[in-house]
Amino acid sequence: MSKGIYDWNLTTSLGLTLSRSTGRQWNGEEILSYRYDQLLVQPKLQWMPARQMEVDYSGHLSYGGSRIGTDTRLDPLLHMIHRLQVSWNPGALRFLLAGESYLDEISAGRYLHTLLADFSVIYNWKRWRATASLRNLFDRESYSYTTYTALQSCESWLSIRPREFLISLQRQF
């Protein structure tokens, strides 16, 4: 589903998916039936409040759980991602702020929130482009999340590069 409000330079969309997977698996001793249910919501928004400014947002909300056999139930877990990018272009300069927010239910009732952000300044002049970027503004060191398949849950940890400052100079030929 999507809707544009062109007088406001705004476009939006919303995706909804409700899915159920079923099947059977041999565990070495017996054949077990399984079922995996998931609700997925994906909103998006693009907005240009001024000629030099643009805002992009996308979200991903997932809620799902599994049932294996008659005795095993994996609790439904919530997983949310929000991405926001704001750019401002006053002439030859471009300022870009990008952020991501992750909210993950690691196990029933146990949540982890992670916020990541980057900032860049870009200067264009004739065939030259200079960029200065500050990555990982909040200096996060790790990120963890839990994923489900129809038959198992898996908790993962990622190490993140520390905060860094990058400068680049490019020439177009």
Image (cartoon, rainbow, N blue to C red):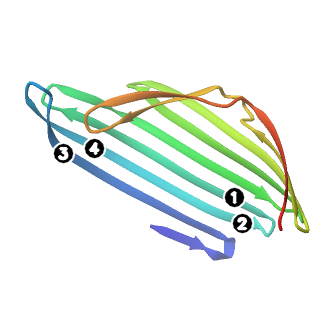
**Sequence-first tag of 2 and 1:** 2
Q: CA distance from mark 4 to mark 3?
A: 9 Å
Residue occupied by mark 1? 55
Mark 1 or 3, which is nearer the eye? 3
Q: Position of residue 148 (x, y in %)?
A: 34, 36
Q: Which mark is residue 130?
A: none
Residue type pointed to by label 2: Met
Image position of 124 with respect to 20: above or below: below
Nearer-N-terminus badge (4/1): 4
User: In the drawing, does residue 137 fall left or right of residue 169?
Assistant: left
Which residue position holds label 2? 48
Label 2, label 1: how far apart the Cα atoms are: 6 Å
* CA distance for labels 4 and 2: 37 Å
The amino acid pointed to by label 3 is Thr
Q: Nearer the viewer, residue 15 or 34?
A: 34
Instruction: Farthest residue to the left: give it.
Output: 30
Please tell me how many numbered marks the rendered image carries.
4
**Residue 105 against residue 128 in the figure, above or below:** above
Q: Amino acid at mark 4?
A: Asp
Residue receiving disc 4: 37
Q: Position of residue 66 (x, y in %)?
A: 26, 36
The residue lying furthest to the front in this view is 173
**Contact? badges 4 and 3 (CB < 8 Å):** no
Q: Is residue 161 left or right of residue 29?
A: right
Residue 22's disc is 3
Is the C-beta separation of discs 4 and 2 under 8 Å? no
Q: Contact, CB < 8 Å: mark 2 with mark 1?
A: yes
Q: Is residue 159 above or below residue 99?
A: above
